[in-house]
Amino acid sequence: MPDDAPWFVKDYYTYYKTERGYHPRSLNSNGGWNQTTALSFMNMPILSYADEIKSAVRVLHGEKAHSRYFGEDAFKKLQGDNKELVIVPGASHIDLYDNKAKIPFDKLAAFFQANLK
């Protein structure tokens, strides 16, 4: 990992290239590249029909996640009053994979208890 790599690349490295998240068949853990990974996004923009979702939705992102903008943009497209955006203070994208001290289990449990019947 180069010293001048962006912080979020280093964050991914500490997950996918270590025992935390490494798997020999994972493209993220290795130098592989899959030519078809993004084809579904090219053919069908992922948020095109977000405004048609009627189910309850909770969007969860880390405050420091480099991908936070995507969750916020998706949240803006959702309709109705059964949606909630949760920004986890001090958390990065990777923190919400396995950092039990930062994952808001109470909020997740409350959401599922209220909406899975």
Image: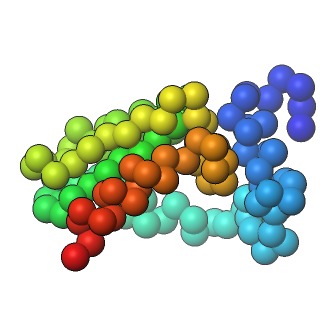
Work out whether 76 lies above or below 7.
below
Quarter of the image containing the N terminus? top right
Q: Between residue 109 and residue 2, name the one nearer to us.
A: 109
When the figure is inspected, residue 57 is found, relative to residue 10, above or below; the finding is: below
- Give coordinates of residue 79: x percent, y percent: 13, 48
Q: Nearer the viewer, residue 80 or 30?
A: 80
Left or right, residue 83 beside residue 41: left
In the rendered image, is residue 107 in sight?
A: yes
Residue at left offset 81%, top offset 62%: 22
**Whole-percent x and y of residue 116?**
26, 72
Q: Is residue 48 left or right of residue 110?
A: left
Q: Please tell me which residue is depicted at 49% across the width and 53% down the height of the picture.
A: 105
Q: Nearer the viewer, residue 5 or 84?
A: 84
Quarter of the image holding residue 34? bottom right
Residue drawn at x 72%, y 29% is 7
Query: Which image quadrant for residue 28?
Result: bottom right
Q: Where is residue 109 drawn, in percent x and y?
A: 39, 60
Measured as percent of width and height from the top left, residue 55 is found at 18, 63
Residue 66 visible somewhere in the drawing:
no
- In the shown orientation, is residue 47 left or right of residue 108? left
Residue in the picture at 57% in, 65% down: 37
